[in-house]
Every structure is written in C-alpha cells, then in structure tokens.
Image (tube, grey):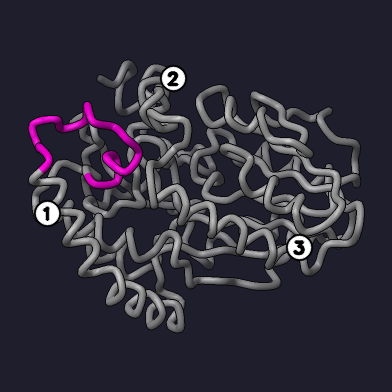
C-alpha cells in the first residue's frame, strides 16, 4: 500500500516537479498498481505515485538480489558474467594504466572484477546494503563501499571513468548524484550510463506490460532528447550512443510478450533468480513451457534487436559522455 496521499506524491522522479499528464497503468510483482506520467518540465516519464520508503524497502528485499549465492541461477548467471567481461574489455580499451574507476551501483562487483583482469586500475564500487553488496565485498582487487555516494567519497577531479549500468533510473535524487559525479571527475573523464530506452519500440508496444518498467524500482525514464539536455545542464556532453544489447534487449522482448499474454508479471525473470515463492501456483510445467518459449524466440529476438538498434529504437541504450571543462 502507498503510505502517503497520491496527490502529494505525483511528482516527477527526475526533476521532482508536479507531473503533467498520465500515460498508462502498470502493476508490480506484488499486485500493487502504479501509473506512468509525463513531465512537461523535463520530459521524463515518471512512476506515480512516488514510492514511499516502505514501498522501496519491500521492492528491494532479498528476492530482488537473488535467493542463491548468485543473483541468477544456472546458465543465466554464466551468460550475464560473460556479458560483464565483454563490457569490461570494451571499456578498458580507452583506459590508461592506473586509471581510477567508479562503478556506481556495482551489484556483485562482477564488472569491476572483469575490469581488473584487463589491466592495472584503481577500482571502486558502491552498492546498497543487500545480497549483491555482500557478494561484491568478496571480490579481490576492488574497493567496495556499502551504501550511497557521498560528497566526500572522492577528491575533486580524481576519477577517470564513472559507470552506471541500469542504475540511473533507480536514483531517488538523480540531480544531486550527477553533481557529485561531475565534481569527482577530472576534465575529459568519461561517464558511461545505460538504462531502458523509453523511446523504444518495446516501450511503445507493451506499455504497462514492458519488462523494463520494473515498478516500483524504476522511478523515471528520460527520452533521448530530454536526457541530452539534462546532461548538458549538469556539465556533460554526449559523445556516443550504443543500442544493441544481447544481455538486455532480447529477453526484455520475450518477457514482455509473456506479460502481455497474461502470465504473472515477470514470472520467468523471477524464476531465473531462483524466486520460487513468487506465483508459486505456476508449477514446473508452466515454467518449463515459458522457458521453451524463450528458447524458441531467443534468436529471432536477437535479430529484432539488431534491426531496432540500427534505428535507435532498441529496448535499452548506453550513453558515453565526457565532462565539459
């Protein structure tokens, strides 16, 4: 249940002003209903009413971080680990030796650990208290802070690379976070951020059934033009965009189709995290059928993502920015 009057909490998740127009409804995995609305001030699409602290505490319980030693189980975790390694290799190509890197919302530290395998860097991660942070603390060669980014965590101009992989849309106070990041980066340092693409074909087609809405954890999503303007106002210039993601986009399509077919929201995704308690009335036969559907659709979904990426309409987007002098 929402603990404060909805009208008081119908504010934009990015700029915190009153939202202007409701778009559609969605439901979370616990059956609570939410709405998405557009802010005419900054252009963001925002979840309303704004989740309370109690809502978020429930949303980030142990099931969110996975019920086993890893967030996902079996082949799913191995595939995601391969994606982390590939991402680390790609981003390491432009890193100098001894570069200082911050991965904000570092999860289990897998990306930083993979980055450590590509060279000699000063690696830092910040992750909220939970199962992922516990796993990250066991990583060698990385410095992990459990909690949130604070103004005095890094000296001004000390960071060479800051990454936020599917973290930006979770931030309760994104403006303040961007200001702290800008202060800690040196001139021409890079900021790399990925998040769901609200301009995508998936977002437009599936609306409230879209996997990447992830209510109530995703508080806002910025369209491309709005994102560029916002980042410029915080002192960053967008220099590159990347749309294709075999890690995020094909499964996003498959799960969104299953959601639209009437299965409990994100059921297959939750079971891949080992969450057997969620929708437990859907037994092994139902899950096996959904896994078979996913297997059949996987390669066509990858092909669809390749086409959508060429058009800039894939389900997720990764931006690379540099700090403006």
Q: Residue at x 63, y 40 (%)?
A: 109
Which SS class for mark 2?
A: helix
Secondary structure of the residue carrying tag 1 is: helix
Q: Residues within 10 Å of mark 3 (few under 14, many from 20)?
A: many
Residue at label 1? 289
Residue range of the region highlighted in magenta in the rendering: 268-284
Main SS, magenta region, reads loop
| Residue 194 place in picture, x, y as percent | 55, 57
**Residue at image coords 36%, 47%:** 20
Q: Nearer the viewer, residue 223 or 141?
A: 141
Image vertical order of residue 63 relative to residue 76, above or below:
above
Which quadrant would the C terminus be assigned to in this image?
Answer: bottom right
**Quadrant containing the N terminus in the rendered view:** top left
What residue is shown with label 2?
A: 53
Q: Which mark is residue 172?
A: none
Distance from Cα at disc 3 to Cα at disc 2 = 37 Å
Residue under the image location 53 percent in, 52 percent down: 81
Element marked by disc 3:
helix
């Amino acid at each position: 249940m929402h603990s404060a009057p909805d009208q008081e909490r119908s504010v934009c998740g990015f700029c915190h002003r009153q939202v202007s127009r409701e778009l559609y409804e969605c439901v979370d995995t616990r059956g609570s209903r939410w709405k998405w609305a557009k802010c005419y001030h900054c252009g963001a699409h925002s979840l309303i009413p704004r989740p309370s602290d109690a809502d978020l505490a429930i949303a980030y319980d142990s099931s969110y971080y996975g019920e086993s030693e890893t967030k996902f189980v079996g082949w799913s975790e191995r595939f995601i680990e391969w994606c982390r390694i590939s991402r680390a290799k790609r981003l390491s190509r432009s890193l100098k030796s001894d570069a200082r890197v911050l991965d904000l919302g570092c999860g289990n530290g897998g990306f930083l650990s993979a980055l450590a395998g590509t060279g000699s860097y000063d690696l830092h991660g910040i992750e909220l208290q939970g199962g992922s942070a516990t796993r990250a603390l066991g990583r060698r060669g990385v410095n992990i802070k459990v909690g949130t980014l604070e103004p005095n965590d890094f000296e001004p101009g000390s960071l060479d690379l800051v990454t936020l992989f599917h973290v930006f849309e979770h931030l309760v106070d994104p403006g303040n976070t961007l200001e702290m990041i800008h202060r800690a980066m040196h001139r021409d340092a890079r900021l790399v951020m990925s998040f769901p693409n609200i301009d995508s074909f998936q977002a437009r087609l599936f609306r409230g059934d879209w996997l990447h809405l992830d209510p109530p954890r995703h508080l806002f999503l910025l369209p491309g033009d709005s994102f560029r303007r916002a980042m410029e106002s915080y002192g960053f210039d967008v220099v590159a965009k990347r749309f294709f993601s075999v890690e995020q986009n094909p499964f996003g399509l498959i799960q969104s189709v299953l959601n639209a077919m009437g299965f409990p929201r994100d059921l297959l995704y939750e079971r891949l995290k080992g969450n057997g308690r969620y929708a437990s009335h859907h037994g092994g036969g139902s899950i096996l059928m959904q896994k078979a559907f996913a297997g059949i659709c996987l390669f066509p979904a990858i092909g669809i993502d390749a086409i959508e990426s060429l058009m800039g309409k894939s389900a997720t987007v990764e931006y690379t920015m540099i700090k403006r002098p």
